[in-house]
Amino acid sequence: MAEAGSNVTELFRASTAHSPSYASLSRVAGDARSIVDFCIPCNPYFPTPAMFEALGERLREILTYYPSSADTITAELCAVLGLNPGTVAMGNGSTELITWIDHLLVRGSLAVPVPTFGRWTDQPMETGKRVDMFPLPESHGFALDPASFVEFVRARGSRTAVICNPNNPDGGLLPRHGVLALLDQLQDLDLVVVDESFLEFADAEADSSVVADAVLRPNTIVLRSLGKNFGLHGVRFGYLVANPGLAGKVRAALPKWNLNSFAETVVFMLKEHRLEYAHSLRLVQRDRQEMLWHLGRLPGLTVYPSQGNFVYVRLPEGVDGAALRDRLLEEHGVLVRECGNKIGSSSRYLRLVVRPQVDVQRLVAGLERTLYAAAAGIAPVPVPQGPGPMPAHVLPYASGTAAVDRLVRRA
């Protein structure tokens, strides 16, 4: 494991903005069946094994033939979600939509709280825009204060504002009424984007989305990510919702066949698998509470509230996240996301993807042995069993994609 781990850590050192891809990791890791992945934010419970089996049976057909047009796939998605196709544009991943939003709609400057999803800072800087970065206060758990953000936007003269809700990497959620108040105060801007890519994992309120409100506003776009929600990052599909004018402008710029046949197949499977999907979200929410509890018991580790399918933690004083990442991988077969290459963060922070309890126990054991036991010269503290019994009905565990399964399958 040490040699493979060493090769993998070299990939992380060479990555200046994001984690290396799974394909890169698997090429250098060799036999990596013992690695448990807390880096890639997958939904472990969806698609179900039966859905993957159905996809496998149709693999040749899916790979052989062209997909339908984006209009056809979008119409089906809207029928499932209850949206008007005229207010929706589907992209080859949310990153494609972020790129077109930047090219078509962002003029001059963009304001965004940091730390956040890297493409919201990197993409406009790559096209010569001024990016006004609003530091989220660690003293308040990285929570966004709408009034302070509006004041910052006014002071900087930003023409576009972006918030991620929940935010990545910390999982902080602004309640729906707070988002609407923010939109009201920024209605004179060229554009306000609410990136809801991880919102379906939230359970703080019955419905935090502002999708229904965006279609009525002249300058608002809501971005959603099916890949993140479904744990199918490799399929690359996301969508935006806005008034017909904004949505149509983005849709007109997209290539006719920008969505692949895997995306089409999954979208057309959704109608009959809505219950399984909803159940998968409840399981992730349960796992998140369990994980927060386990991590919160580790001395010196600061664990921030999260409504995403990941948890943001600050390491004890004097601990370097990159060195810890390398040791966890090489000595314990646990892969974590160190945040030293995220603007507004540092190597003292980790973003840890929510996983089932058995995997979290392995993570906690590795952290205990690496952070405390070696220095004290004592055996690691036994991993606690959690605050209560696990729910009786649990879907069979899967990482979210067959490829990720091969990487993270326990030995």
Image (cartoon, grey):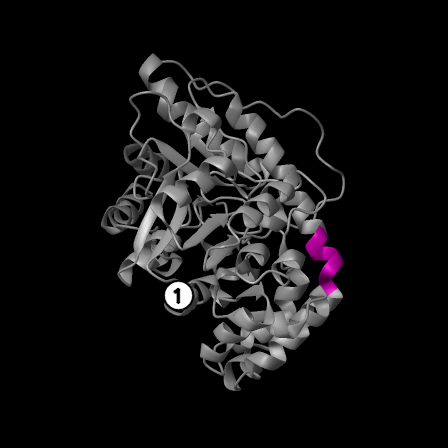
Where does the image place residue 2, in percent across and percent down from the top left?
29, 41
Where does the image place residue 405, in percent across and percent down from the top left?
51, 55
247 left or right of 162 in image: right
Where does the image place residue 103, in percent across and percent down from the top left?
37, 68
Query: Where on the picture, by quarter, is residue 37?
Result: top left
Does 276 appear in magenta?
yes
* Camera-nearest residue between 369 and 80: 80
Q: Amino acid at mark 1?
A: Thr
Is residue 336 visible to the viewer in this orientation of the structure? no
Where does the image place residue 303, in percent across and percent down from the top left?
49, 27
197 left or right of 96 in image: right
* Camera-nearest residue between 329 and 317: 317
* Camera-nearest residue between 265 and 183: 183
* Camera-nearest residue between 204 and 151: 151
Does 103 appear in magenta?
no
The main secondary structure of the magenta stretch is helix
Report the residue that reaches farthest toward the bottom. 65
User: What range is drawn magenta here?
Assistant: 273-278
In the image, residue 351 sits, relative to residue 231, either above or below, namely above
The residue tagged 1 is: 99
Other-residue count near label 1 (Cα within 10 Å), few / some / many at <14 / 14–19 / ≥20: some
